[in-house]
Amino acid sequence: MELIDTHCHLDITYFRENFDTLHARARAAGVTGMVLPGVDQDGWARMFELTDTNAGLFAAPGLHPMYLSQHHPAHLEELAELTHTKTLYAIGEIGLDYFIKDFDAKAQQDLFEHQLRIAEKANLPILLHVRKAHDRVLATLRAKRFSKGGIVHAFTGSYQQATHYIKLGFAISFCGTITYDRAKKVRAIAAQLPQEAIVVETDAPDIPLAGRRGKANLPEYLPEIVEVLAGLRNEPAEETARYTTDNARRILGLPP
């Protein structure tokens, strides 16, 4: 199976010492493409160091809503400049996070809208990080008439919210959450959505699979997520691999 991990953080310091080994193991497992989303400006240099020198790694720089204190106006200017000077496949991960303690809704909203403008102007899709804020994100996408689509990362919203994202040109991404029997709502959604609206991810090193709690998640585990997804949808894993890979390439404009 050829797979694309639409969201993993192999560029972070945690993976620096054994990146080559982990990258090789992921490719040996069939994960031939990995999208590296940004978190803050400090990480962009390492992201491009890897995507510029490794086939199958794709850059998606952005400013994460959980780390407002690390972001500055100059970083938004730099992000806009990157759309002209580097090969980008998305702006991400961006969005709203109302789950964290003492969140600043206005600051998050301003950051989100600014990055939406950058993506729209650059004709780039976005990678959405959303927790406890799906309705607000959907309202923003409609109000700003964002037209480039993208991927809703590690989706845990409702079926209705998923269908609204799909109507706006977004794919829904499923991760290790679906490997837990107790995750009944998201597993049910994964079973029901149309093939053309689904992609997969690990979010490595986060969201470990069932049976691996307390251990770092890795891109090489993506085939296990696909196997579970195929089981939930009552279809061959090869079919699930095919359409999730095709969807990732189409939505993000990834090379064959």
Image (cartoon, helix red, strand yellow):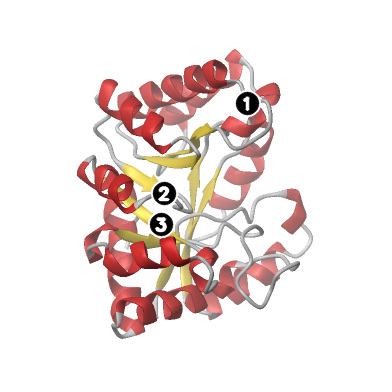
Of marks 3 and 1, which one's residue comes earlier in the chain? 1
Discs 3, 1 touching: Cβ within 8 Å: no
**Front in this rendered view, residue 198 or 133:** 133
CA neighbours of label 3 inside 10 A, class few (<14), some (14 to 19), many (20+): many
Q: Which residue is mark 3?
A: 173
- Distance, label 3 to label 2, CA atoms, is 11 Å
Position in image of residue 247 (x %, y %): 29, 60
Q: Secondary structure at mark 3?
A: strand
Label 3, label 1: how many angstroms apart (C-alpha)?
25 Å
**Residue 253 shows in the view:** no
Residue 241 in the image: above or below residue 7: below
Query: Dot 1: within a 10 Å radius of its alpha carbon, few (fewer than 14), some, or many (20 or more) residues?
Result: some
Task: Indicate the secondary structure of the residue bearing disc 1.
Answer: loop
Residue type, mark 1 in image: Phe
What residue did someone put label 1 on?
103
Counting residues from the start of the chain, the first of labels 1 and 2 encountered is: 1
**Rendered residue at 37%/61% (across/down):** 199
Residue under label 2, please give it: 157
Res. 54 in view: yes
**In the image: residue 93, left or right of residue 159:** right
Mark 3 against mark 1, which lies toward the viewer?
A: 1
Residue at the extreme bottom: 236
How far apart are labels 1 and 2 at the CA level? 19 Å
Residue at left offset 53%, top offset 16%: 106
Horizontal and vertical percent for residue 155? 44, 52
Give the residue type at disc 2. Gly
